[in-house]
Amino acid sequence: QKEVEQNSGPLSVPEGAIASLNCTYSDRGSQSFFWYRQYSGKSPELIMSIYSNGDKEDGRFTAQLNKASQYVSLLIRDSQPSDSATYLCAVYERQARRQNSGYALNFGKGTSLLVTP
Amino acid sequence: GAVVSQHPSWVICKSGTSVKIECRSLDFQATTMFWYRQFPKQSLMLMATSNEGSKATYEQGVEKDKFLINHASLTLSTLTVTSAHPEDSSFYICSAPLGGASYEQYFGPGTRLTVT
């Protein structure tokens, strides 16, 4: 069973601070990585995708990928109370347990982020 | 705006009845769609991959005769929960990739099913 691991939190940061969310994965062959935000009672919303080692920035969000360490992270700068949500790390990988061994997104359990005013 | 829609957004049904959930891609064609289930405070679990014009691929442990999937067109997949029981109460979410070289998947708003 290939794993995507996240600290469940909650991670509490003050408004305006940088929130750092981490994720590790076990499948060395994975090439595509995603961060989703999920508010309580809602479906996930895609925030960032990253495919190459290094940093990728989009507004207040920066995704970081290190394939050698099998590690992907998400930084949120100038955190706002509206950023309070669960952040899901997802890895696109071959699913050996599936009937045709196709590819699918494998999700971590998510990290709960709380930004306090 | 939303790229994937779901209907209904919530449904309450009696034990033993069947419920159909629709998932539509808006303004793009989706030959593949995915169905997930999420129990409270747990992560998303992939149930099955819906393939347009062919049989769905189910994940291990998901009963294909209980969760019927039909992907009859390039913009519509349906999930029917047959003979629903209270333990089937969950948040059901579909997703679709925009396609091309992108593996990004976009999720529908979800359907909350409560079986009484």
Image (cartoon, coloured by chain):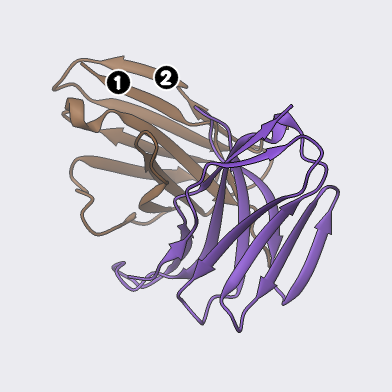
Chain colours: A purple, B brown
Residue type highlighted by circle 1: Thr
Q: Position of residue A60 (x, y in %)?
A: 83, 47
Real-space Cα separation, disc 2 to disc 1, in angstroms: 8 Å
Q: Position of residue B83 (x, y in %)?
A: 16, 29
Residue A74 horizontal side relative to residue B8, left or right: right
Chain ID, mark 2? B
Residue B77 can be seen, yes or no: yes
Q: Residues within 10 Å of mark 2 (few under 14, many from 20)?
A: some
Going by the picture, which residue comes out furthest to the right?
A59
Going by the picture, which residue comes out furthest to the bottom?
A68
Quadrant in the picture for residue B15 = top left
Chain ID, mark 1? B
Q: Earlier in the sequence, mark 2 or mark 1?
A: 2
Residue B1 horizontal side relative to residue A87, left or right: right
Residue type highlighted by circle 2: Trp
Q: Nearer the viewer, residue A46 or B69?
A: A46
Q: Which residue is mark 2?
A: B10
Residue B84 can be seen, yes or no: no
Q: Which residue is mark 1?
A: B114
Write the residue at 39% across / 32% down.
B91
**Above or below, comparing residue B21 to residue A34 in the picture:** above
Q: Residues within 10 Å of mark 1 (few under 14, many from 20)?
A: some
Identify the image quadrant of the N terminus of chain A: bottom left
Write the residue at 48% across / 31% down.
B110
Write the residue at 37% across / 57% down.
B54
- Name the secondary structure under disc 2: strand
Write the residue at 52% across / 81% down.
A29
Q: Are marks 2 and 1 in contact (CB under 8 Å)?
A: yes
